Image: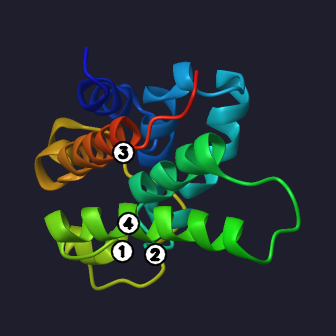
Amino acid sequence: MTRREAAMANFMKGYNCSQSIVLAFADMLDIDEKSLLKMSSSFGGGMGRLREVCGSVSGMFMVAGLLYGYDGPETGQVKADHYARIQELAHRFEEQHGSIVCRELLGLNVRHDVPVPEARTAEYYKKRPCPEIIGDAAEILDQFIKENEIGE
């Protein structure tokens, strides 16, 4: 199963967009799945259904942070290099979807949505492009990692 397929399958199981991404890359990360899932649980629906940055984009950024991030109070080149990676991921996503903002991706007019998620019914999946968006995010991240391999 590709990471794209895994991420999409995770969403269809009920994980939020951010969880779907981090779980698809869990085998590469030095953190247990339960912690990954809890860490990313706040980022579904564009950050707690605030409809801001897409959860799949936040998930890409979390994985990139765990793979390439820094762990000190950096202020110089290390920070700049990492932020350049994050901006590159965002740019690749925007090239495909025109935005990294949840409400724009879903064509919603609401800025901050109610906190209660919709039931995951067949109708829900028909009107939401989320599985494909999540798949695209996983594919973008997978390609980025292949281009920027770190020593294993």
Q: The residue under label 3 is which amino acid type?
A: Leu
Q: Give x and y (percent) for residue 29.
A: 62, 28
Height in image: 105 above or below 128?
below
What whole-number distance in Å separates the C-alpha atoms at marks 4 and 1? 16 Å
Front residue (pair 59, 124) = 59
Disc 3 crowd rating (10 Å Cα; few below 14, some 14-19, many 20+) is many
Residue drawn at the location 42% of the way across and 85% of the way down: 111
Q: Which residue is mark 1?
A: 101
Q: Secondary structure at mark 2?
A: loop
Look at mark 3 in the image and give the residue it sits on: 141
Does residue 97 show up? Answer: yes
The Cα–Cα distance between marks 2 and 1, rounded to whole angstroms, is 5 Å
**Callout 1 secondary element:** loop
**Which badge, 4 or 2, is on the more N-terminal residue?**
2
Tell me if residue 62 comes above or below residue 2 in the rendering: below
Cα–Cα span, label 3 and label 2: 20 Å
| Residue at image mark 4 | 88
